[in-house]
Image (cartoon, helix red, strand yellow):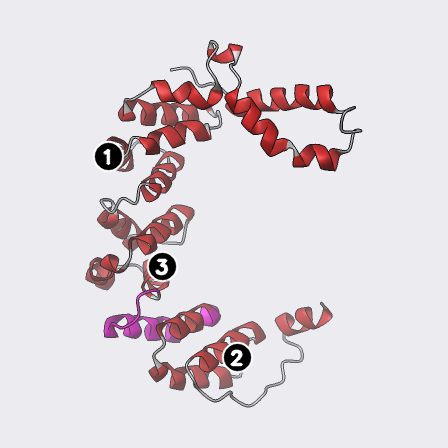
């Protein structure tokens, strides 16, 4: 199938529209820019010669084969042509059929990261829980944080508490990077002792991100973390930004604020003071 550049066609349409309407709007580019959403809706609803007389908004509606549409989306990526939002919207409109095609793309070892990340985003729009274990297994093997892992994490969070046991099941064999990502996910589901233990372990060992893990401990709401937070707040090596988040976590857990500290010379403190 032909990969039509809808973005370029809209750019041409916009250029012609501005030329035709510049005098009407007195060349006020702020007003013209404010009109762009309306211009886009007009573009979508007008029959176009480059679509053999179809309107852009109806073009992909003529196709019902989800696998074919997903393959078309991948071809757009291969050719370096922007994937039309209208194509992705049509894919998600097909529901279960699209889910199956997107899962196949997710399992295709030859698929690009771009294609797989788009599949993850579309499966999330479909509220699909079928790829749950795929996402967990991918994160568990991460050697370093990456965008695909972040997308998987966001999708898992959106699935709700059902992700907790499967994640805890792989935690023992997960990489250090994966444990950090899993901590991010699990911080949204307080009440499990194993999650609290993970968060305490990450707070103790990942000292270059104490602010982050302090915020997770605050979310869990377990005041047993106060001792570790007080100790971190008193650490002579703690930087100003971490200290602020640690104190915030202490507040959230109902603890008494530690004594004020001086941070003169701390690069974060000095930078904020200048601002």
Residue at disc 1, secondary structure: helix
The numbered mark, 3 or 1, whose residue comes first in the sequence reads 1
Residue at disc 3, secondary structure: helix
Marks 2 and 3, how far apart in space?
Answer: 25 Å
Dominant SS of magenta comes to helix
Q: Residue furthest front?
A: 24
The residue beneath circle 2 is 237
Please state which of residues 270 and 23 is positioned toward the viewer in this rendering: 23
Residue 160 is situated, as x and y percent measured from the top left of the image, at 29, 57
Taking the image as shown, residue 163 lies to the left or right of residue 245, namely left
Q: Is residue 191 magenta?
A: yes
Marks 1 and 2, how far apart in space?
Answer: 53 Å
Taking the spot 45% from the left edge, 31% from the top edge, the residue there is 85
Reply above or below: 261 against 79: below
Instruction: Identify the image quadrant of the C terminus.
Output: bottom right
Q: Is residue 134 visible?
A: yes
Q: Is residue 41 magenta?
A: no
Q: Which residues are magenta?
A: 188-211
Residue 76 is situated, as x and y percent measured from the top left of the image, at 42, 24
Taking the spot 28% from the left edge, 70% from the top edge, the residue there is 195
The residue beneath circle 3 is 181
The residue beneath circle 1 is 96
Q: Splitting the image into 4 quarters, where does residue 43 fall?
A: top right
């Amino acid at each position: 199938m032909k990969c039509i550049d809808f973005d370029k066609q809209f750019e041409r349409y916009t250029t012609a529209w501005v030329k035709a309407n510049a005098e009407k709007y007195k060349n006020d580019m702020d007003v013209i820019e404010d009109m762009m959403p309306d211009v886009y809706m007009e573009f979508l609803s007008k029959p176009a010669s480059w679509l053999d007389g179809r309107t852009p908004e109806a073009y992909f509606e003529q196709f019902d084969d989800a696998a074919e549409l997903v393959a078309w989306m991948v071809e757009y990526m291969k050719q370096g042509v922007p994937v039309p939002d209208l194509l992705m919207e049509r894919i998600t409109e097909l529901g279960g059929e699209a889910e199956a095609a997107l899962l196949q793309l997710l399992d295709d070892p030859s698929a690009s990261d771009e294609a797989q990340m788009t599949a993850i985003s579309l499966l999330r729009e479909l509220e699909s829980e079928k790829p749950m274990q795929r996402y967990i297994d991918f994160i568990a093997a991460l050697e370093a944080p990456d965008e695909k892992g972040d997308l998987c994490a966001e999708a898992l969070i959106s699935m709700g508490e059902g992700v907790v046991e499967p994640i805890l099941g792989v935690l023992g064999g997960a990489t250090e990077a994966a444990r950090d990502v899993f901590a991010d996910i699990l911080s949204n589901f307080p009440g499990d002792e194993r999650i609290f233990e993970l968060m305490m372990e990450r707070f103790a060992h990942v000292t270059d991100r104490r602010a982050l893990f302090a915020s997770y401990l605050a979310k869990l709401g377990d005041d047993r973390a106060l001792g570790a937070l007080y100790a971190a707040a008193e650490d002579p090596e703690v930087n100003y930004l971490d200290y602020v988040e640690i104190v915030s976590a202490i507040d959230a857990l109902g603890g008494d604020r530690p004594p004020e500290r001086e941070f003169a010379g701390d690069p974060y403190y000095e930078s904020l003071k200048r601002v």
